[in-house]
Amino acid sequence: MSSNSLERTIDKVLSQKESALISEIESALQNSLKNLESSKSSLQVEYDNIIESSKKQAENLKRQIIGSSTLNARNKELVIIESAIDEIFDKAKEKLSKSNNEKNYERLLTRMIQDSTTKLGSEIIIQCNKTDLSLVKKLVSQEASNKKSKITVSDEAVDIIGGIKAVSVDGTMSLDNTLDSNIESLKPLIRKEIVQLLRGENK
Amino acid sequence: MIVDGVTKASFDELVEIETNDGERRLGKVLEVGSGKAVVQVFEGTTGLAITGTRVKFLGKTMVMPVSQELLGRVFDGLGRPNDGLPDPVADKFLDVNGEPMNPQSREYPTSFIQTGVSVIDGMLTLVRGQKLPIFSGSGMSHNILAAQIARQATVVGTNEDFAVVFAAIGVQYSEAQYFKRSLEESGALKRSVLFVNLADDPAIERIITPRVALTVAEYLAFDLGMHVLAILTDMTNYAEALREISAAREEVPGRKGYPGYLYTDLANNYERAGRIKGKNGSVTQMPILSMPADDITHPIPDLTGYITEGQVVLGRDLFRKGIYPPVNVMMSLSRLMKDGVGEGKTRSDHMEVGNQLYDAYSRAQEVRALAEIVGKAGLTGVDLKYLDAGDSFETHFLKQSPDENRNLDETLSRAWDILATLPEGELTKIKDKHIQQYYKGNK
């Protein structure tokens, strides 16, 4: 074979190979473009889903943060209000403990003693705080002479703001008529009024 | 505890007991007669001495202080704060026994509550004012479901306030913590009131817990006009406590040792759900009870089923397959669903889709049984499609993550996905116009 014909054959093979390669590349390109096109829509769906779920998560997180912050703020307010209520009660108790010289207080104690004999019978033992001891003894002696009841005032003072504690002679029944217990039983109602005042709701 | 020398005490009267060292406990009168009163102490009798213990009859039944401030708070089984915060400032003090609703004033429940759980919203719809119990078994995921409903439940399309009252009755400490954390972390606590009675609390406290919770629910609903979902879990523990106290009182036992008045007692609690004419709010109840040995004929689920308006039954088979929520729809039913769904309430195809799903799943169950005998090769083409629809129902519709909140459109869309696996001719429960609008299968 001459060198010319060899070159022609090589050129022919090369050109055939070149056109085959070009057509392969073109078809690969077309396939890739097709794949890209079809992936675009599925990617878009996936992207939309991710965005949608992120939005949901963000919304949930927002709700959580707002919810817990509102709750924390409210709880802090409750604690502050409660400490204010305690302070008010402490002040009120302090004031009450100094009111044993007032005429009203004497009348209150008389009513409490009468109440005790009505509820526990005519024979009772009464306890009060150290400051009220002489006043209670005086009132008891007045009451005993009026109603033929046998009331004993215990010399053992109890730690209370005011009022009395009465016990039946056999010790089975007792009546707690102290100012402390009266305040305690009325506390839920008084608290409501204090809170309304603190929040300016009573205007 | 028996108190001697008592003349004027009344049944159910609240009693304050003062121990020798000044500690105060509460109790209530169970029986009175012959100068004696039998008192059940809420906190238990440990540490009470025979001499020196003082008892004060308070002349009133147990009351619960109520106000809007209860929302976002956690209480113990007797309604005392359990979250380290002060006592709530009361707007009112309400008797925990409640007042029976006048039947004449009751309004029929017709409005939808979305729980975000596909199987409930799509097939066992909860309606405002309904009482729909969940019957579960020991160890199943009822508490996870309860917490999910508490977090997600809402009334759709209105600006009306919604609240959840959650009463955990006789639960373990870890479960109580789970409920609390779950509500806190989801931000749902601010619209919830949580009552926690632990398993080691005295039995008598368990009797009070649902009553206290329902008292609060009634206040929020009928005084403040909110729509309230009351979740009571686990009512089996409540009934056990009732049996314990009944046995202690030497009452004549009824079925399985439960007192003869178990039905009346359960009804006293369940009938506190409903709507009242002329008032905005509603109390919807979801009592949860674990059936001993998965026995649905046990007195507790049996009597509960008589009183409530349907039931959601959790199935052991589905639970073992790892499906959550494992709702056995074939045994479940919401009797009021028909009145709470459809045009103007949810979506016009809702009821029909629900019915068709029931039909398809029921047929799938039959085909599964048949396939076990004759093998898949012996099934017809339509049977095989039902088999696929059944599997798809369990994995695509029923199965849901505990923190996945699906709205009704998503639920119905999933339902239509399942129905799309069936030939159009099989959709006999759905009107043509809905098939044309929503059917995605081959026509």
Image: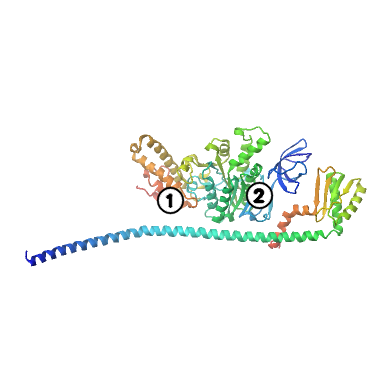
Residue hosting label 1: B413
Q: Position of residue B383 (x, y in %)?
A: 37, 39
> At 82% from the left edge and 60% from the top edge, which residue is drawn?
A98
Q: Position of residue B22 (x, y in %)?
A: 75, 49
Residue B433 appears anywhere in the view: no
The residue nearer to you, when weighing B46 against B278, is B46
Q: Quadrant of residue A63?
A: bottom right
Q: Give amino acid for label 2.
A: Gly
Residue at the bottom extreme? A4
User: Left or right of A148: which side holds A98?
Assistant: left
The residue nearer to you, when weighing A121 against B220, is A121
The chain identifier of the residue carrying mark 2 reads: B
The residue nearer to you, when weighing B289 against B304, is B289
> At 48% from the left edge and 40% from the top edge, which residue is drawn?
B316
Q: Residues within 10 Å of mark 1 (few under 14, many from 20)?
A: some
Q: Position of residue B261 (x, y in %)?
A: 64, 36
Residue B304's place in the image compared with A99, above or below, is: above
> At 64% from the left edge and 33% from the top edge, which residue is drawn?
B253
Q: Quadrant of the C terminus of chain A?
A: bottom right
> At 34% from the left edge and 58% from the top edge, which residue is drawn?
A39
Mark 1 vs mark 2, foreground winner is 2
